[in-house]
Image (tube, helix red, strand yellow):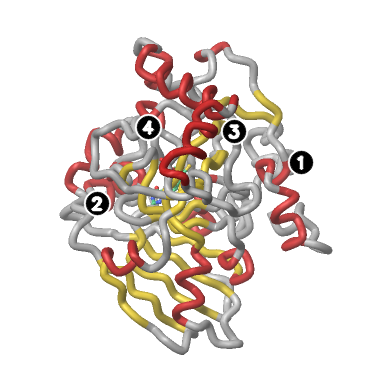
């Protein structure tokens, strides 16, 4: 996410590229095992449960934060079997401008965030507006693990095992009115807890938006954790959005308000540079960013700086699930 300067977003090496690989080989081995079915078979017999792995997280928690148990998601498309990004990379190579614009700033400075106590106000064009305490939100629906690719507009991607539930579960509870067409997400902007909010790099608070049908899509995740634990501060604790078919900046972190509207809401990056960041921001290899191509991407942790780039897929590979949301739309115009 760059506005004024043009520095190479690929230039900062990821943690796994500069630290020994042993740290994440264990998790990879576990995933290979799961893909091969050995662990799955063991689980099937475990305690004679018929619902296979219904409440079993797939990824070994790194043991750094509080555990957030989850069951395997049954949502179509929610469980890519691609290699999961190393936890060290996913937590040290971040965009969270409230803590600075460098990829390493959020890990360095986000300790001041204080994700508890926390509330999320849900308001606007709904019959049942309500402010949820974090614990109420956590219990609203069973936590699921979903392994999603996330493609950043800057040209890199990660595969992260998120923990959360479909945003639709929350939306149904507040009963949107017929006139509600969009959902706005407002995130925390507290100078005392977020050193970057003192800078003028963005118009705070960071906001994002979705069309109501996008927000209701089962893949749209309200996330509270990753890698079997609560979210680290730098990844958007205690609650964030993950919209896997859109560029990463749509996935708003540290949400404090969700507002239903009849008009397309402004969004942080759209306000900062209208011609570069559209409202939809669906991952689209055919629509270049004005300053760089979107045709390929670098998977973080994959073979260092000299790794071959991968082809970026339309809708980040989720076209079968979400393509129909945009039937008949000119996606070059509505980028
Ligand atoms: N949310 C807030 N509040 N502030 C931000 O700067 N950055 C976005 C998004 N959500 C951002 C945010 C961008 S550009 C990306 S790519 C993703 O968060 C990165 O999420 P990750 O650091 O967990 O990979």
Ligand 1: does it lie within 8 Å of the C-beta at label 2? no
Q: Earlier in the sequence, mark 4 or mark 3?
A: 4
Q: Please rate how many residues cluster around mark 4, counting C-alpha atoms within 10 Å: few if below 14, some from 14 to 19, many from 20.
A: few
Q: Which residue does the numbered mark 2 point to in the structure image?
A: 198
Q: Which residue does the numbered mark 4 point to in the structure image?
A: 60
The mark total stands at 4
Q: Earlier in the sequence, mark 3 or mark 1?
A: 3
Which structural element holds mark 4? loop
Tell me, for residue 286, which label it has, or none: 1
The alpha-carbon separation of the residues under discs 3 and 1 comes to: 26 Å
Ligand 1: does it lie within 8 Å of the C-beta at label 1? no
Q: Check if mark 4's residue and mark 2's residue have beta carbons within 8 Å.
A: no
Q: Earlier in the sequence, mark 3 or mark 2?
A: 3
Q: Position of residue 204 (x, y in %)?
A: 35, 59
Q: Tell which tag, 2 or 1, sits nearer the viewer.
A: 1
Q: Check if mark 3's residue and mark 2's residue have beta carbons within 8 Å.
A: no
Which structural element holds mark 3? loop
Q: Earlier in the sequence, mark 2 or mark 1?
A: 2
The alpha-carbon separation of the residues under discs 3 and 2 comes to: 41 Å
Q: Which residue is located at x 50 percent, y 56 percent?
A: 221
Q: Tell which tag, 3 or 2, sits nearer the viewer.
A: 3
Q: Earlier in the sequence, mark 4 or mark 2?
A: 4
Q: Please rate how many residues cluster around mark 1, counting C-alpha atoms within 10 Å: few if below 14, some from 14 to 19, many from 20.
A: some
Q: Position of residue 280 (x, y in %)?
A: 63, 58
Up the image or down, 220 lies above or below 68; here it is below
Q: Please rate how many residues cluster around mark 3, counting C-alpha atoms within 10 Å: few if below 14, some from 14 to 19, many from 20.
A: few
Q: Which residue is located at x 56 percent, y 39 percent?
A: 149
Q: Which residue does the numbered mark 3 point to in the structure image?
A: 81
Q: Tell which tag, 4 or 2, sits nearer the viewer.
A: 4
300 and 109: which one is in front?
Answer: 300
Left or right, 101 with reference to 327 = left
């Amino acid at each position: 996410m760059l506005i004024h300067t043009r520095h190479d977003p690929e230039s900062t090496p990821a943690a796994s590229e500069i630290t020994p690989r042993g740290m994440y080989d264990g998790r990879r081995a576990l995933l290979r095992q799961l893909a091969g079915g050995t662990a799955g078979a063991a689980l099937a017999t475990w305690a004679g449960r018929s619902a296979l792995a219904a409440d079993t997280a797939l990824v070994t928690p790194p043991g750094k934060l509080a555990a957030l148990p989850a069951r395997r998601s049954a949502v179509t498309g929610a469980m890519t079997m691609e290699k999961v990004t190393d936890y060290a990379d996913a937590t040290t190579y971040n965009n969270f401008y409230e803590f600075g614009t460098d990829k390493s700033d959020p890990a360095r400075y986000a300790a001041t965030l204080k994700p508890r106590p926390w509330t999320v106000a849900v308001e606007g064009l709904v019959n049942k507006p309500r402010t949820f305490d974090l614990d109420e939100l956590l219990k609203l629906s069973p936590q699921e693990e979903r392994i999603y690719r996330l493609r950043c507009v800057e040209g890199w991607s990660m595969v992260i095992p998120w923990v959360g539930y479909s945003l639709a579960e929350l939306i149904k509870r507040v009963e949107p009115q017929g006139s509600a067409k969009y959902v706005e997400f407002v995130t925390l902007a507290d100078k005392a807890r977020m050193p970057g909010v003192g800078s003028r790099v963005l118009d705070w608070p960071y906001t994002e938006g979705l069309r109501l049908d996008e927000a209701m899509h089962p893949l749209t995740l309200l996330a509270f954790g990753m890698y079997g634990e609560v979210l680290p501060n730098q990844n958007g604790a205690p609650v964030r959005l993950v919209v896997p078919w859109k560029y990463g900046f749509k996935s708003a972190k540290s949400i404090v308000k969700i507002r239903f509207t009849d008009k397309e809401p402004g969004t942080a990056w759209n306000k900062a540079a209208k011609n570069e960041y559209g409202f939809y921001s669906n991952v689209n290899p055919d629509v270049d960013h004005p300053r760089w191509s979107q045709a390929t991407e670098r998977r973080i942790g994959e073979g260092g700086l000299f790794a071959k780039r991968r082809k970026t897929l339309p809708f980040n590979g989720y076209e079968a699930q979400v393509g129909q949301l945009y039937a008949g739309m000119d996606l070059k115009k509505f980028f």
